[in-house]
Image (cartoon, rainbow, N blue to C red):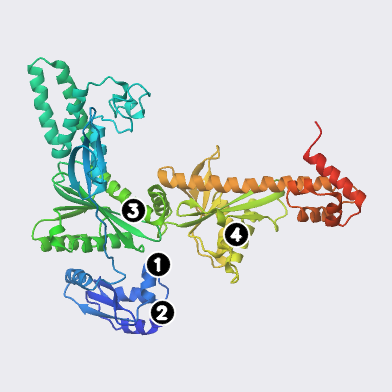
Amino acid sequence: MNERLPYLREKTSKLTVSPGVYRMRDKSGGIIYIGKAKNLKNRVTSYFRENPDHTPKVAKMVSHVYDYDFIVTDSEYEALVLECSMIKQHMPKYNILLKDDKGYSFIKISDEEYPRITAEMQKKGEGTFLGPYTSTFVTRQTVEEANKVFSLPSCKRVFPRDFGKYRPCLNFHIKQCMGVCRGKTDPEEYRSIVRQAEDYIRNGSEASVETLTEQMNIAAENLDFELAARLRDRISAIKRAADDQKIIHEDMKDTDIIAMSQNGESSCAAVLMYRGGRLFDRAEYDLGAPDSEENMLEDFVLQYYSDPTKIPREIIVEEELPNGEMVERLLREKCGRAVDLFSRKRGKGLKLIMMAKANAEESLAIKVGRSGKEIAALEALGKLLGLPEPPVYIEAYDISNLGSSSMVAGMVVFENGRPLKKAYKRFSIKETAIQNDYASMREVLERRFRHYQDASETDEGFSRMPDLILLDGGKGQVNAVEPILREMGIDVPLFGMVKDNNHRTRAIATSGAEISISGTKSAFMLVTRIQDEVHRFSITYQRKKHGKQSYEMGITQIKGIGEKKALKLFTAFKTRDALKKASAEEIAKAMGINHDLAEQVREYIQNEMHPAN
């Protein structure tokens, strides 16, 4: 809690409603954040109001604000220009600060009977090297596209040494490799194809098609129809590849594609740069703690293009920017020429945005030690459920029982898309005497959050507040639990996981409706995995408990042994192995019974462990 809030609110109440730029300062007077506003009073007031709905990043910034100052401008556009200039000058802690790392790599065409095209970090070995390229990613993507378009092998087999040793791999069967491993490809013809692939890499698909078309026409004039047919097929392959490949785009002469990814703790932006119709470079930038995605994207664009020489003629962004027209105008004035800024929701532009987003996800995944797919799944699930940010820490619950006996519940935890098994918890249902899944779920959630509210609680599985709670079941379970959480002051998004008649995940339930998740594959797979894991965990506990109860009941059939004495036995010897090894004297001491009765108990245990055939 910022002790300066009363002062800041009082100061803000007298602020002008004109557009301008505000500068938040810490106790030492240093500038920690710079922002622009169409209406200074409304914007600054939003930071210091009584019940703010800030993102964690903004909340942290506000907690450090000691004072602020401002500069009034004549228009919102002037405020935007001034904000960009001041951020570049002062580099405030809570504004986006851009850093990236560059590497260099090469494309190698090996010098051997059957040359290979590979991406390399250094010039090693004999062969032809293309480059250097400033982006390892672009190099690898280019090699992958060339090998795919020209059906060249990308496996680790050595030719001609490995001819006929192995069956052709999957790439051959799906027509992405010519199957050199079969030993039926002429070396000279193969090298000709490699030269075509090299020309494709150097000059692009359009130039390659022109060259191959000329060669095809010459072959036809010379009546070499077999060669002409192969060249025709190669031209068709290049044209087909041009519809799907993402490396060469003749219509993107000077274009940047920008997308973002967030995971609840961090965020990242990725830029794909096309120059001269082909992918020239790629860069990722760590943007720090997440905020509103549209605002972060706009801030990133303004920071990234602070240097006029970096501004391309076309910028495609993932989402419409809040002040898109003003940003476009600012970029045009900076570089003194036309600049188009827009988003794409379909076609090739969308494919490239998804490619940029995948790169941002992978970069973020490396930082948090997770895969790009896991980051994407959490982001997709958060958007599907309308959460303000991706749920990093998820708890899921399931009830398992056999009638009114062995009623138990399991709690599993997923952190950053993966099971956190050390935080799993098991519950025996205590307050519900008969089978009632709704009442059991209420009891479990109430007990779980009583632990959370206990100031002395140190267990990690109880002391942390989840970002999302998932219950195995539909809206009935959600409606049963919601009132308990409200009474306890627990404000966590709560949903049910609904199965179909075949016990497969079908939808997410709210208190009054269902949200289909089948159309969002990554989110669907994550929820399915969570639902399967919580069911496995709870049913395993239920079976174990039921088996132990059956065993205890068998011992109580011995005359003179009641439930209390049986409980003493199982408290002293917690496993069947320990019971099997126990002597009559040890059993007598644990249960407080005489030696003869202990011998009967020991005999029962041995027979139970080794029943007669």
Helix, strand or loop at label 4? It is: helix
Q: Position of residue 605 (x, y in %)?
A: 81, 44
| Quarter of the image with the C terminus in it | top right
Classify 10 Å Cα crowding around label 4: few (below 14), some (14-19), many (20 and above).
some
Instruction: Check disc 2 and report the residue beneath it.
Output: 2
Q: Which mark is residue 445?
A: 4
Q: Amino acid at mark 2?
A: Asn
- The disc, 1 or 4, on the residue closer to the chain's N-terminal end is 1
Q: Which mark is residue 363?
A: 3
- Evaluate whether residue 179 shows in this view: no
Q: Residue at x 73, y 45 (%)?
A: 547
Q: Are marks 4 and 2 in contact (CB under 8 Å)?
A: no
State how far apart marks 4 and 2 are (Cα): 33 Å
Q: Amino acid at mark 1?
A: Pro
Classify 10 Å Cα crowding around label 3: few (below 14), some (14-19), many (20 and above).
many
Helix, strand or loop at label 3? It is: helix
Instruction: Check disc 1 and report the residue beneath it.
Output: 56
- The disc, 1 or 3, on the residue closer to the chain's N-terminal end is 1
Classify 10 Å Cα crowding around label 1: few (below 14), some (14-19), many (20 and above).
some
Q: Is residue 106 above or below residue 454?
A: above
Q: Position of residue 307 (x, y in %)?
A: 16, 62
Q: Nearer the viewer, residue 217 or 410?
A: 217
Q: Amino acid at mark 3?
A: Ser
Q: Are marks 1 and 3 in contact (CB under 8 Å)?
A: no
State how far apart marks 1 and 3 are (Cα): 22 Å
Q: Residue at x 64, y 59 (%)?
A: 443
Q: Residue at x 82, y 39 (%)?
A: 607
Classify 10 Å Cα crowding around label 2: few (below 14), some (14-19), many (20 and above).
few
Quarter of the image where one finds residue 215:
top left
